[in-house]
Image (tube, helix red, strand yellow):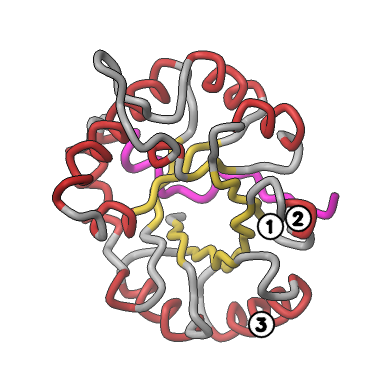
Amino acid sequence: MHIDFVFPQNNEEELIGIASNFGYSAVCFCYEPTKLNANSIQKKISSISLKHNLKVYSAALSDEKTISKAKGFDFIIFKANKDLRSNLEKFHRKIDFVYGAESVSSKDSMHNRNSGLNQILCKMLDECNIKLILSFKDIITLDNKKFAQFIGRVKQNIKLARKYKLGVKLGSFAQNIYGLRSRHDLIALLIVLGMHPKEAKNAFIHTHLKININSN
């Protein structure tokens, strides 16, 4: 019942084998839609899922320029930018997750953290049933200067998500087996970042996801 989101580099078989050992019952392989054909990805995934006792999904990591090419994937992960509000208004029917809101602004204001989300955006996400997705890879690859700022923004967005009842997911976003972590480790991380234990556990339950091949 638990899912991880990974970004394979033609190493899907290797990643899914380790994911199973780490307690996941599902894996979502994420790709940039301009680099790979969705049909070939689905064929590869179907072949892999037959060999392993895991449910396998696919996702396209897209922005406003590439979302039109993200067809045939189970999910669309939209990379946040400064025009997130207008992009949500335009593409909300296609988007399943928003990623990277914490990295949109380079600087915080004097009194607030520019976490990429606000009241209006949170209400839009809630109304459109779009979830936030956080990346463990982003956290562990930050340098010391940016780490505290980024973590502060993540904590703020977790608070906003709770206030506006937004779904939050965390994926390892691993590109190789060394980037994978057990769900227990990632649950512990979310609790440290401010989630209640139940919220942290729900961040990995894939039955909470709406599975709908994006073909529009």
Q: Residues within 10 Å of mark 2 (few under 14, many from 20)?
A: some
Q: Say whether residue 206 is magenta.
A: yes
At label 3, the amino acid type is Lys
Residue 112, by quadrant, is: top left
Q: Which residues are magenta?
A: 199-216
Residue closest to the eye, 201 or 125: 125
Residue 96 point in image, percent of width and height: 63, 43
Q: Give the labeled residue for mark 3.
A: 44
Q: Earlier in the sequence, mark 1 or mark 2?
A: 1
Instruction: Judge the density around disc 3: few (<14), some (14-19), many (≥20) Cα neighbours within 10 Å.
Output: few
Disc 1 + disc 2, Cβ < 8 Å = yes
**Residue drawn at x 23%, y 58% as measured from the top left:** 140
* Residue wearing tag 1: 74
Alpha carbon separation for disc pair 3 and 1: 14 Å
> In terms of image quadrants, where is residue 22?
bottom left
What secondary structure prevails in the magenta region? loop
Q: Residue 207 placed where, x, y %? A: 55, 47
Q: How many marks?
A: 3
Q: What amino acid is at disc 2?
A: Ile
Say left or right for 151 vs 175: left
Q: Disc 2 designates what residue?
A: 213
